[in-house]
Image: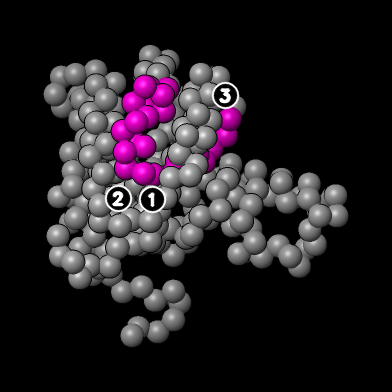
Amino acid sequence: MNEELIIPNHIGIIMDGNGRWATQRGMVRSMGHKAGIDNLKKLLKHANEIGVKYMSLYAFSTENFKRDTKEVDFLMDAFVKKFTTDFHEIMETNCKVVFSGRGEPLPKKVLDAMASATEQSKNNTGPVLNICINYGGQWEIVDTTRKLCEMYKNGEITLDEITPESYNHYLYQDLPPLDFVIRTSGELRTSNFMPYQSSYAEYYFPKVLFPDFNEEEFDKALVEYNSRNRRFGGVKK
Ligand code: IPE
Ligand code: IPE
Ligand code: MG
């Protein structure tokens, strides 16, 4: 890869298209999720090698509970496996895993596996991997607002202390802003993914389905990022 490229500090990936990938091959949707998870393993290794510092992954939205129980159960079991038996794969990338999302109504086995992943990787010094499970951007803003209202009520914070920067500190995770958000599968929407953190992010919508979004596609995305002119409301340099 071109070594001159600027690597975005915080990359978000809306990992979409697993179901279509499977359907196109005459397989059940869950096989697409399996292929997506296998692909993720390679991507994480690659992201670590090229020096990505923060990565946020949209794995399951609050709205995804609307899907068939069979598919939801498959995904829940896949999360448990990823954060327990297969967790050594993530440990090998030295990633520090954190989660964003609501606890309710995730099954206890998933919450336990998530807690174990956080605990095991807490001292890792590689990229921070923020995994969004049962995540909804609107809920994150509502939950944060509720937290701040509680603090205000208890005299722990004043109104003047609530600013765009301090608000960020009380989100599910206190992460730097998203620089680059990639959504695979060609859908041109963000589906409730990290709205607060992506206010100045660059977006990229490749047509490729997530199981096929390999290292080469990732590098192509970085080239695209480098062609953008970020102004943050200022004047073009
Ligand atoms: C993304 O792939 C994975 C999750 C939402 C869990 P999809 O399952 O949405 O795949 P498509 O969009 O139906 O192809
Ligand atoms: C967004 O994809 C959620 C994840 C990738 C986890 P969806 O497939 O759920 O989004 P919509 O329904 O197409 O907007
Ligand atoms: Mg989808």
Which residue is labeled 3 in the image?
A: 105
Q: Quadrant of residue 184?
A: top left
Label 1: which secondary element:
loop
Residue 168 seen in the current view: yes
Residue carrying label 1 = 127
Q: Nearer the viewer, residue 7 or 125?
A: 125
Q: Which residue extends farthest top?
A: 70
Instruction: Kindly identify the amino acid type of the residue bearing the numbered disc 1.
Output: Pro
**Quadrant in which residue 91 is drawn:** top left
Quadrant for the C terminus in the image: bottom left
Real-space CA distance between mark 2 and mark 1, rounded to the nearest whole angstrom: 6 Å
- Residue 36 visible at all: no
Circle 2 sits on which residue? 48
Q: Over which residues does the magenta segment extend?
A: 79-103
**Disc 3 to disc 1, C-alpha distance:** 28 Å
Q: Secondary structure at mark 2?
A: helix
